Amino acid sequence: MRSDSHLPAQQVDLPHQRAAEPSAPASSAVAGRNVLIVGINYWPEPTGIAPYSTAIAEHLALSAASVTVLTGLPSYPEWKAPAEYRGRRRFRQTRNGVDIHRLWHTVPSRQDAVRRGLYEGTFFAHAAASRPPRLPDLIVGVTPSLGGALAAAHFGARYDAPCVVVVQDLLGAAAAQTGIAGGGRVAALVGRAERHALRRASAVVLVTDAFRATLRDYGVAEDRLHTIRNWSRSAPARRDRDAERLRLGWSDATVVLHTGNIGLKQGLAVVVEAARITRDRRDLRWVLMGDGSQRADLQRQGSDLPNLEFLPLCATEDYPEFLAAADILLLCERPSVKDMCLPSKLTSYFTSGVPVASAVSAYGSTARELTLAGAPTPSAPGDAEALVKQIIALSADPQLGARHGADAAQYAHENLAFDIAAERLDAVLAAAVADHARSAPRKATRHGSGDRPPRSQGRIATMPEGSTTDAS
């Protein structure tokens, strides 16, 4: 039966949506230059940081002489590489003007410090040993993984080129805070390696100001730190909400939806416990949509709960429809997670206009972002009773939920558009290139006949768009 406490369809006036993906003018910062980007996550991974790295590369490709990406095997969030990528050491693809070089690395099916170290180490070793097809004029590293930042610093030194690192997560903090087995023992080592890479960068881009204190502690000068928020990738929902809810079997309940990675960092056992507390309420349904290292365990824990549903990752074009069909969107983190990351799903959550409930540390970077967006006050992470109270309160006051959703949508409109991020990134890259040009004369390795690729102002021959080949 339908409860009177259900939130109605979101009847809020959302601000006009800017285009979510590359729509900004071509970057003058890299015009005529060869750009090398290093990061383990890239297209076709549908979630996490890969879509952001992909959009940056494709934006720069609009004006650069060339954009080369050194990346890994697509495996996130399932932690399993597709069959067509297995058994080969190197692949080359082209997509939207970007020359993609995929390097083999281990893919840990279970997360612990040793397996994660092998994942990081094998990618870094193969990336650092690679010879880019063109002499890079600018290098961009993306972290995670740590190997992306380390390899970018390595290439910057090898080719005497400016190096800019985009920090999506703080990996030293992540090792200590995510709960990965053995992480606490290696956190200091990871932090030292991260510090080494970031201190050598010409500029460091942070997705949240919450990272600044750690970077200052690392010894990175304040004038080299630049905050550029991730942008919302979601277009507005277009299908009829009631019809979508009927199709999903959500018509008769208040639906609380969590999307994306189901891993250690998210601490989603609290959702299973909350579903158990409310198992006798037919008017409340908990939905976990996504994949990750903890999904199978959580499914076993909640196998007897009729009000808990697991869904696979949806197609990118369907994602806004799922968000709009929910009554409440949910974000959870482990109690130990404080300042190591800012979940990328928040940008899409805010854009949807659906209220966002959360169970995160009140003193962490995620809580700060939720506060800026006008979201409800988070409940304590890991506290299922408190989470249930928060959900019931939102469900009982539809107008309050609608106001929270509208405030977040307005915040996203004003702060989380791609054209805003692209303009700021272009300025950072242009400054890094200009500062490097004013520095000491080029080192011999940049002009000598040693370990360097040929310089080319044009594009080299590539395979067809999106094709895959074995280059080993």
Image (cartoon, rainbow, N blue to C red):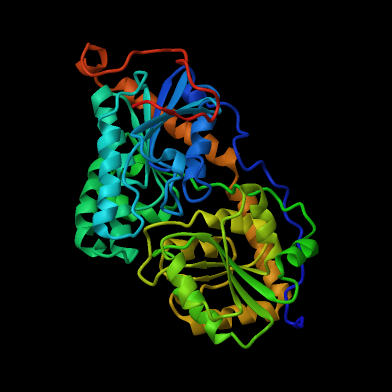
Who is closer to the viewer here, 343 or 437?
343
Who is closer to the viewer here, 128 or 73?
73
Q: As drawn, is 207 to the left or to the right of 472?
A: right
Q: Quadrant of the N terminus?
A: bottom right
Tell me residue 143's x, y (percent).
36, 45
Tell me residue 456's x, y (percent).
40, 12
Who is closer to the viewer here, 172 or 302?
302
Tell me residue 224's x, y (percent).
35, 39
Q: Is residue 380 above or below residue 402?
A: below
Who is closer to the viewer here, 16 or 414?
16
x 38%, y 39%: residue: 72
Q: Is residue 321 above or below residue 150?
A: below
Q: Visible in this render: residue 424?
A: no
Q: As drawn, is 457 to the left or to the right of 151?
A: right
Q: Visible in this render: residue 21?
A: yes
Q: Is residue 120 above or below residue 67?
A: below
Q: As drawn, is 236 to the left or to the right of 159?
A: right
x 28%, y 44%: residue: 220
Q: Quadrant of the C terminus?
A: top left
x 77%, y 67%: residue: 246
Q: Is residue 146 above or below residue 306?
A: above
Tell me residue 372's x, y (percent).
54, 61
